[in-house]
Amino acid sequence: MASVFKALAHAESAYAKALHEVATSDAALFASSNIFKLFSQKSGRRSDALLSLQAAWDAVLESINSRAALHSQVAVDLIKDVAQPLGKFASAGRLKAPLSRGKGLLANLRAAESAYTSAKASFAKAKVELKRARRAYVTEPDLDRKRRLEASYAAARKTASSARKKLVRAHKAARTFADALTTSKLPGVYAALEDLERDRGSTVNSVLHRFVSISGSVVPAIKTACFALYSSVGAVDVDADLAAFVAAHKSSLDPTSMALIAPLDPAELDDVDLQGDDARDEHGSDSGSGRDGEDVDAGDTDNADNAYDDEYDDDDGDDDADSSESVDDNRTTVAEAAAAPKQGKVAQDTGRDAADARGRERVESAGSAVGAAVDSATGSATDSALDSALDSGAGSAVGAATLATPTASPYASVATAGDEVVSSSEYETDDDVAASAIQELIQRRARAESEAAAEAAASVAADASSPESEEEEDAAVAAATAAAAARRERQRLRKEQMAAMAAARARASGPIIAAEDDDDDGGAGRGRKAGPRGKPKAKSKKNENKARARAGSRGPGGGAPPVARGGAAPSSAHDPELVAMIRSLAAHSRHNDYYALFGIGDPRAPLAAIAKARRELTQKYHPDHQKDDTARASATEQLQRINSAFTNVLRNPQTRLLYNKLCKYRASYKQMTLGALNSDQLRLAASNLKVLLKDVEAENMPMDLIAEIRLCLGIVQRRLKV
């Protein structure tokens, strides 16, 4: 904006110079007139020519007086309409608020960083102290002194666990604040600064317009310069001025200077043995009092670890929790083995622990397989990966694989978005029940396998400790019976799991409609698995091709339209008005695709990326960069669309959330317009559209979006009436 103010100052200087020249000429005219009057009076001549000349001079004097009054009015208007608005804008101090907010945000981030650094130092100090206490405890040969060192060793473990929990909490707080700062808070500060710069540009624009309208008609000498100055306002690079402004405040508003919080290294948290396994192993063969003391210490550590697991919800925390559970299981097994007098019970416990360890290994391997399948899953590949995961006893990862159904972008246009199924991962609320059911079924299956393995191990141990007899044969028969029962239980659980997954997959058929039945989903849930279940799919395709051939032989419009179970609406081919509404809806959806307008591929893109795209489009479609009037008119219209979409929709988080919901609903447009939904689904779609329409109207969003929702609602209601 400095360039604009500088140009305005030059214009005012030129205008003042022109006024001075006019005043000088007025003074000369007055002097000439007075000389002429004096000459005519002294000469005493009263000829007609002199009288006409006198009248002409009087007219000139009257013109001079009127022009002088007009010049005075121009000066007053310039002071009122140019100098005062600019001075008021400059003294308003509107830049102080965003600058203060940005400085406060950075101060809070640095405070969080300082707390994290302090917690990190405390944990490092606690680790050193723990290592020293552990070394002293382990290497002490005297039992009496060893017992005395137990208290200090337990206190050091407790202190290290508490320091670790505080470190995780401080890291989580600092990282959360840093993420929020870089994704939403600081971009908001820059957006406020940009708005102030644009407001100042608008003020200068209006001031110059008033300046031209006043001075151009009075002083033609500077009219051309004034209009040239006014036309140059549109070419001012506001973004460059904003960049220069931010550069001038680099010390307080520079996002690159922030030290972003990196993820915690698991080695920092897990390189210290907080359980004391080595010390317990060395001291385990000592007196009973020593074991009791270690049990108390282990209990304290378990409590600290539980509190740590509650605070630290990262993946590394889960691994640490699994390792601590494994250590606890091993400690329990050792204690029971030392206390149990019978060999059979020892074998049974050992078999159960071994089965649990195998189950955990299978869950981890299956979880990795399912994670890889989720990243590249399409069609039957997802189901095959899911089946292998189920066969290997995958845990909660099955829920993730269930939600990994093939999908298209929910922000595609009506012409391409109807054939795909929207990913149910975007609508996790509807699938939580299914995921919980699957998790419960898997846990039941794992418990059944563990019990079966424990019984088998117990029978083997009993066989090893007793001579061969009829009881041995009975035990073998019992083990075989238990194994068969376990297999039947697995088969039953598998069927229940597949049914739950089919229900979850059906609910993902569209964001605006209810879950369809397996027979009504267009074959989306059939014929995916390899083997005998794949045959009906081929058969259904063959029959479908035959039906299409028969329909084509009867000519266009021949035969009754297909009706799905539940009363699906007929085709719209016989209703010209409905066809026109469908075409209008497709045009509205393409026109209202704001993300395509901004060239944004990800609807979850941060506001800073959208603002950057807006600045680039503003430069591209600036009227001064166009060649002819037609191009300028088109560019102006495009700029209006861009500014309206950004200001009224994408900039506000609430309105953007509503717009994203509408984009998700567009994925079901083709199903609604082609009559692929039954009456129940259409009624649910109408209810959802009414709620969205009410919210959009309450937020005063653009009329184009309201018209699109009303048009879609009208199509749904027309389908219901048919």
Image (cartoon, rainbow, N blue to C red):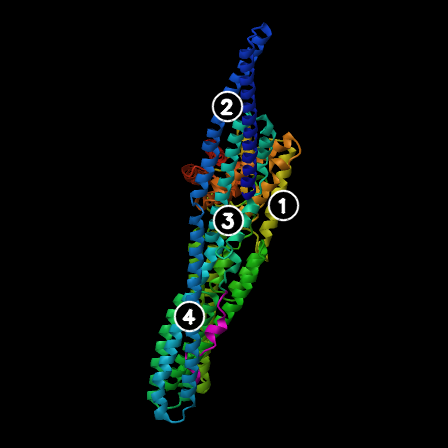
Return the residue nearer the eye: 442 or 631: 631
Crowding at dot 2, Cα within 10 Å, few <14 / some 14-19 / many 20+, comes out as some
In terms of secondary structure, where does tag 1 sit? Answer: helix
Within-10-Å neighbours for mark 3: few <14, some 14–19, many 20+: some
What amino acid type should be assigned to the residue bearing mark 3? Leu
Q: Which comes sooner in the sequence, label 2 or label 1?
A: 2
Q: Which mark is residue 607?
A: 3
Q: Residue at x 38, y 86 (%)?
A: 338
- Disc 4/disc 2 C-alpha distance (Å): 76 Å
Q: Nearer the viewer, residue 349 or 298?
A: 298
Disc 4 target residue: 118
The stretch of residues the image draws in magenta is 262-278
Sequence-wise, the earlier of marks 1 and 4 is: 4
Element marked by disc 3: helix
| Mark 4 Cα shell of 10 Å, populated few (<14), some (14-19), many (≥20) | some
**Please, which residue is most extreme toward the right here?**
627
The residue beneath circle 2 is: 68
